[in-house]
Amino acid sequence: MNRRDALKATTVVLGGALMASSGILAACARTEHKGAAANGVVTRDDQDLLADIADTIYPTTASSPGAKAAGVGPVMTLLLNDCYEPPDQQRAIRGLADFRAACSKRHGATFSSLPRAQREQFLREVDAEATKAGDKHYFHLVRDLTNTAYFSSEVGMTKALRYDRIPGKWIGCMPLEPGQPAWG
């Protein structure tokens, strides 16, 4: 190797090191949101309430386990802490506090202590309020978290939906029989 080739090789190596340290690779670094999981956005009580809400939306049936059996509480917490922006996180946390207060005011008890029929009725009332209030209502976010956590779980994907690991040919209009789950 002559001096010119050595100088070229050294320039390439040093140039690559400078570019990597100058911030080009900094875009790949994970940034933490203020209030993320380490700072405790979602408390254990919030996680339990989220799991109770999800289990009321997707209860255990004869054909599929419910949301609690799928372990959606920690997944919902993870999604909320790691995948949502701080304003949405705070909207959900404030919404859960409002949810607790409304449940206590209307029923004089915590949501988890209510019988299933009362929990379902209360969720219908909250959903009606959310529909009237629009997209900025916290319940839309909670419902989306519930759907994502449940249907991305093994239980939700394989028991609640009709899971086809290796799909066959595409059929545009597939008839469903009564009671048959949707395709996942």
Image: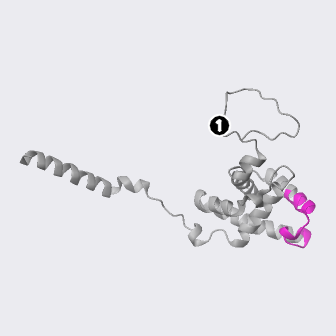
Q: Is residue 99 visible?
A: yes
Magenta residue check for 48:
no
Q: Identify the magenta region.
A: 106-123
Residue 135 visible, this angle = no
Residue 146 rendering spot, x and y as whole percentages = 73, 55
Color scheme of the displayed model: one colour
Residue at 80%, 59% (x, y): give it: 55
Q: Which residue is the site of mark 1?
A: 166
| Farthest left residue in view | 2
Please give the count of numbered marks on the rendered protein: 1
Q: Is residue 115 magenta?
A: yes
Residue 14 position, x and y percent, is 21, 54
Q: Is residue 73 above or below residue 148?
A: below
User: Quadrant of the rendered structure where residue 109 is?
Assistant: bottom right
Towards the viewer: 166 or 14: 166
Question: On the rendered image, what quadrant is the C terminus found in?
Answer: top right
> In percent of the image, x 74 and y 38: which residue is there?
183
Establish if 86 lies above or below 108: above
Characterize the local packing of mark 1: few (<14), some (14-19) or many (20 or more) Cα atoms within 10 angstroms: few
Residue 26, picture quadrant:
bottom left
- Please give the name of the residue rendered at 22% of the width and 52% of the height, measured from the top-left corner: 13
Q: Amino acid at mark 1?
A: Ile
Query: Residue sitting at 88 percent across and 58 percent down?
Result: 120
Front residue of 28 and 99: 28
Q: What secondary structure prevails in the magenta region?
A: helix
Q: Position of residue 98 (x, y in %)?
A: 78, 67
Residue 140 percent across, percent down from the top left: 74, 53
Q: Secondary structure at mark 1?
A: loop
